[in-house]
Image: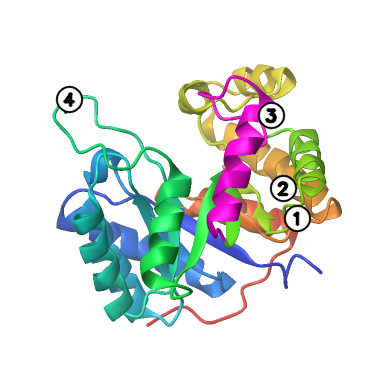
Amino acid sequence: MTINTLPISFEFFPPKGEDGISQLMVQHDLLLPYAPRFFSITYGAGGSTRDRTRQIVTTFHQRAGIPAVPHLSCIGDTSESLKQLLDTYKAAGINRIVALRGDLPQEVEDIAKEFHYADQLVSFIRQHYGDTFELVVAAYPEVHPESRNAQEDLTNFKRKVEAGASAAITQYFYNPDAYEDFLHRCQQQGITIPIYPGIMPITNHDRLVRFSARCGAEIPRWIEKRLLDYQGDDISLQAFGAEVVAQLCEKLMALGAPGFHFYILNQAQPTLNILNHLGRRPLVHQAA
């Protein structure tokens, strides 16, 4: 499989306000020519962006013929409210869900605690909707930051697979050895669902360090030190970042990655730079 036939997908987060949504549509249209399998939309802690996520998913889904996929987290939610939302998505023709545990909003104390883990959400959806939805779950090649060790994390991942997950998207990483090792350990456990690497463009040193500390992603020392060379020179930093991430993607393709899921951060150009480095050609015309 070549880079031009490899499945790719793109992830946005819900912006605030109508101006933010209008700008998001511009970024969406810049990415359309690269024929993604889907666009996914994240879901704030405790369902804090529920309405905006639904609004954007519905708009994307009706807009250009490329599926839109909502993220759905369960922690802090009730089975009834989840079912209402899933019914809405089913009626709208949405057939894929990114099913996550999610995080509790820090400022809320009195909140429902019916669900605790993502495998419970996967089981709930399969119980009530059968095969209506393809269920995509999260995977952590460098181990979830709350797991005590790699084996515990793999056991948790296997629970999601056994509950009915269809595919997985990984947390971003920059060490291809972590992905290779994770695939090997999954194979030993009989896990065969496709595991798509999550790809994070490098555009800013401080933001990358902050994100990575929060989610447990390792920044190889040589990359971090090179990024420091470009502080104050955003153009050179982003050019270096695009080259590094494109090289990572090439290594992952050699390892048999089934496709890539790009974390867009609502800015298309950094990902377009990576795709251009890889030689990915636009495959469809932009939407009018």
**Percent of width and height locating residue 235:** 55, 37
Residue nearest the observer in this picture, 96 or 220: 96
User: In this rendering, would 276 be left or right of 51?
Assistant: right
**Percent of width and height locating residue 99:** 43, 53
Q: Which of marks 3 and 1 is nearer the N terminus?
A: 3
Question: Pointer 1 and pointer 4: residues touching (CB < 8 Å)?
Answer: no
Q: Mark 4 points at which residue?
A: 107
Amino acid at dot 3: Gln
The stretch in magenta equals 139-165
Q: Earlier in the sequence, mark 1 or mark 4?
A: 4
Residue, x 38% and y 57% (percent of image)? Answer: 124
Q: Earlier in the sequence, mark 2 or mark 1?
A: 2
Residue nearest the observer in this picture, 159 or 99: 159
Residue, x 43% and y 75% (percent of image)? Answer: 132
Q: Residue 21 carries which label?
A: none
Quadrant in the picture for residue 40: bottom left
Q: Mark 1 points at which residue?
A: 257
Separation (CA) of disc 2 from disc 1: 14 Å
Amino acid at dot 2: Ala
**Percent of width and height locating residue 102:** 37, 40
Q: Mark 2 points at which residue?
A: 246
Q: In front of the other: label 3 or label 2?
A: 3
Residue, x 35% and y 80% (percent of image)? Answer: 93
Q: Name the residue under label 3.
A: 151
User: In this rendering, would 102 be left or right of 286?
Assistant: left
